[in-house]
Image: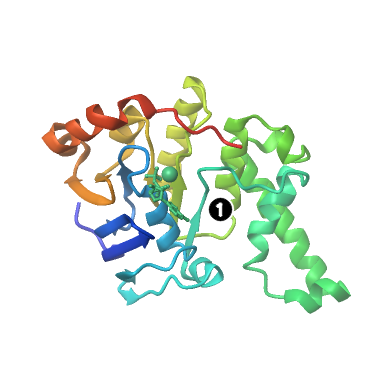
């Protein structure tokens, strides 16, 4: 496959005090791919996500989205550019319903704006109805349509992760970045997650996936980058990466026992 490059990132470095969390990391994601970012705990995967989604300012790095320079400097600009993400530690509005959580994601695309909301203009009300309808669709799409009116905190971890995906999709992103979406899921839920990510790709979106479950990564990803101690140690197809001696060593050396390390809060 050699399609259009959606995201090209080069030479990203990020230091926290004495710790070099990322050194000279780059990757190139083609439109329509599921791209895997893997590596042992602490390798810098989430930091990389935080850089490309504007939460952390990198010390260096260049970014191009769909052929244009892209500066991930503010979170709302990232969303406008068409990148949405989920978080390793689930960040939902716990006391809002599943539906409301998705509607919040949708509102960043809303046109009537704050004044419309305050004065509840007809245009605002019409838009609100449309947003609710789309939110219902998205909940059904990720497989939790029946949970629309439940508060987020009452959902299982697996369903909360699905809800986060629905909320991210509400921005209609070109690139959906998922930070360990399978964490806290049981085997059945993982199979469903795999089917969902496949569907998202088949529906024309591009996915960047951080994942610990090697089986899930190998089955889903078109290409993979492996990080270890902030450095890129391998890049290629899942099969190529799996045979790479440095990767095997990184996983056996210090990552093997941390596969299920972090449960959502
Ligand atoms: N905001 C931060 N301040 C200081 N250190 C951080 C911060 N974020 C991440 N780190 C450190 O950077 C390294 C990489 O972390 P992270 O990107 O979360 O790894 P991963 O997601 O691959 O498990 C770790 O050593 C972590 O402690
Ligand atoms: Mg992480």
Give the secondary structure at mark 1: helix
Q: Name the quadrant of the C terminus.
A: top right
x%, y% of residue 219?
A: 31, 32
Q: Where is mark 1, residue-wise?
A: 168
Q: Please tell me which residue is depicted at 78% across the width and 66% down the height of the picture.
A: 126
In this view, the residue in front, 68 or 127, is 68
- Please tell me whether residue 97 is drawn above or below residue 110 in the rendered image: above
Can you tell me which quadrant of the image ligand 2 is in? top left
Q: Locate residue 236 relative to residue 42 in the image: left or right.
A: left
x%, y% of residue 21?
A: 34, 54
x%, y% of residue 151?
A: 76, 39
- Please tell me whether residue 165 is drawn above or below residue 216 in the rendered image: below
In this view, the residue in front, 123 or 258, is 258
Q: Is mark 1 within 8 Å of ligand 2?
A: no
Mark 1 nearby-residue class (10 Å; few <14, some 14–19, many ≥20): many
* Residue 11 in view (yes/no): yes
In this view, the residue in front, 162 or 243, is 243
* Residue 205 in view (yes/no): no
**Image quadrant assignment for residue 66:** bottom left
**Image quadrant assignment for residue 110:** bottom right
**Outermost residue, right direction?**
119
x%, y% of residue 108?
A: 63, 66
**Outermost residue, top direction?**
187
Q: Please tell me which residue is depicted at 50% across the width and 43% down the height of the picture.
A: 88
Q: Locate residue 146 relative to residue 189 in the image: left or right.
A: right
Q: Please tell me which residue is depicted at 19% across the width and 56% down the height of the picture.
A: 2
**Image quadrant assignment for residue 23:** bottom left
């Amino acid at each position: 496959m050699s399609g259009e490059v959606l995201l090209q990132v080069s030479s990203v470095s990020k230091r926290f005090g004495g710790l070099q969390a990322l050194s000279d990391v780059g990757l190139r994601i083609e439109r329509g791919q599921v791209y895997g970012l893997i590596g042992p705990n602490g390798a810098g995967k989430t930091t990389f996500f935080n850089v490309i989604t504007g939460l952390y300012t990198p010390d260096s790095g260049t970014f191009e989205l769909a052929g244009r320079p892209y500066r991930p400097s503010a979170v709302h600009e990232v969303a406008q550019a068409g990148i949405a993400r989920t978080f390793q530690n689930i960040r939902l509005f716990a006391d809002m319903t599943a539906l409301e959580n998705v509607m919040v994601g949708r509102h960043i695309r809303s046109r009537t704006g704050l004044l419309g909301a305050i004065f509840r203009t007809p245009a605002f009300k019409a838009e609100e109805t449309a947003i609710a309808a789309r939110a219902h669709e998205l909940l059904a799409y990720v497989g939790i349509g029946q949970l629309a009116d439940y508060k987020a905190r009452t959902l299982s971890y697996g369903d909360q992760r699905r809800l986060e995906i629905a909320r991210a999709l509400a921005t209609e992103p070109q690139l959906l970045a998922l930070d360990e979406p399978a964490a806290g899921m049981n085997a059945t839920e993982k199979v469903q997650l795999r089917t969902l990510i496949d569907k998202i790709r088949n529906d024309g979106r591009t996915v960047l996936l951080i994942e610990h479950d090697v089986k899930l990564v190998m089955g889903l990803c078109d290409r993979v980058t492996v990080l270890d101690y902030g450095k890129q140690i391998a890049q290629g197809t899942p099969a190529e990466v799996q045979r790479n001696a440095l990767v095997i060593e990184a996983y056996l050396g210090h990552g093997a026992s941390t596969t299920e390390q972090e449960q959502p809060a």
